[in-house]
Amino acid sequence: MTDVPTPAAVLDDTPPSAAQTRAVEEAIATRRSIRAFLPTPVPEATIRRILAVAARAPSGTNTQPWKVYVLTGEAKERLSTRVMAAYDDPQELATHAEEYDYYPVEWKSPYIDRRRKVGWDLYGMLGIGRQDKARMHAQHARNYRFFDAPVGFMFTIDRIMPKGSWLDYGMFLEAVMVAARAHGLHTCPQQAWARFHRIIMPMIGASADEQLVCGMALGHPDWSRIENSLVTEREPVEGFMRFVAQPSAGDAA
Ligand SMILES: Cc1cc2nc3c(=O)[nH]c(=O)nc-3n(C[C@H](O)[C@H](O)[C@H](O)COP(=O)(O)O)c2cc1C
């Protein structure tokens, strides 16, 4: 493979071609969470390249707070087996908890409505009813097999790194997912793993200084699976954007 492009490779102001614009927009906009993968392997060189491109993500004072564990083959199977056993055993499950809040403790609109919608859209597609706890459990458990993807990432951060570094981390994660699209691959970011950090961290060889951020599945989608037809909605730009050209009424100065 050719070298990863560097910022220095673009030194002029030549406008992008329509194809370049389209390619970048498509890589971003065709990313979506895939929840059923084919066993088709992803070459190690592709994984390395995706991570090399993603590492061009910005971070405050270039701290680059990310660390990635790439799980394939037997190591991935062993981790999945161990975590699924914990998830399926109510007594053991009760002993595992996330180290950080990903979601608000108290929900409010519009977030709770969006959350419910995506949940029911997914379960509805799969024919899982609102009372069908066993099938909900089984569907959630698919997280712990990386939805059958051939590659599973575990992302960790040094415990001393504060909230700002988590902002950097999010940019890196998005860059990984977008870079994967450039290779025709798809992903699913997975916070579901975070609950099982006590099992995962020793199994991947992470140190006590590290904290588990999340996992991610990477591979080729199985388009025959209904769950992969889920395309989530977005608020139109007008819903979350204001142009501020005039001082607002609250600006007393
Ligand atoms: C950090 C992060 C963690 C997520 N964790 C999970 C997860 O554990 N399991 C899952 O099925 N989806 C997970 N998602 C996917 C979201 O549900 C998804 O991004 C959202 O519904 C929007 O859909 P889209 O990704 O298809 O655009 C996660 C997304 C993010 C950004």
Image (spheres, rainbow, N blue to C red):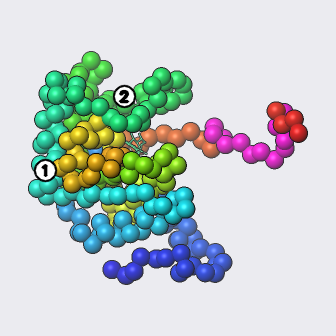
Q: Which disc number belongs to residue 77?
A: 1
Count all numbered tags in the image, as a single digit: 2
Circle nearer the viewer, 1 or 2 = 1
Q: Nearer the viewer, residue 186 or 190?
A: 190
Q: Which residues are magenta?
A: 238-249
Residue position marked by numbered label 2 in the rendering: 120
Pointer 2 residue Cβ closer than 8 Å to ligand 1 = no
Q: Is residue 249 left or right of residue 105?
A: right
Identify which residue is drawn at 42% across, 27% down: 116
Callout 1 crowding tier (Cα within 10 Å): few <14, some 14–19, many ≥20: some
Mark sitting earlier along the chain (1/2): 1
The quarter of the rendered structure image containing the N terminus is bottom left
Identify which residue is drawn at 57% across, 70% down: 18
Mark 1 residue type: Glu
Residue reaching furthest to the top: 131
Asked if residue 32 is positioned above or below residue 17 in the image, the reply reads: above
Identify which residue is drawn at 48% across, 24% down: 107
Quadrant hosting residue 242? top right
Identify which residue is drawn at 46% across, 29% down: 104
Mark 1 lies on a secondary structure that is helix
The quarter of the rendered structure image containing the C terminus is top right
Residue 195 belongs to magenta span: no
Residue reaching furthest to the right: 253
Q: Position of residue 54 (x, y in %)?
A: 42, 64
Q: Main secondary structure of the magenta part?
A: loop
Callout 2 crowding tier (Cα within 10 Å): few <14, some 14–19, many ≥20: some
Q: Position of residue 185 (x, y in %)?
A: 32, 60
Q: Position of residue 181 (x, y in %)?
A: 39, 61
Mark 2 lies on a secondary structure that is helix
Q: Is residue 146 in view from this perspective?
A: no
Q: Position of residue 175 (x, y in %)?
A: 44, 59
Question: Dots 1 and 2: beta carbons under 8 Å?
Answer: no
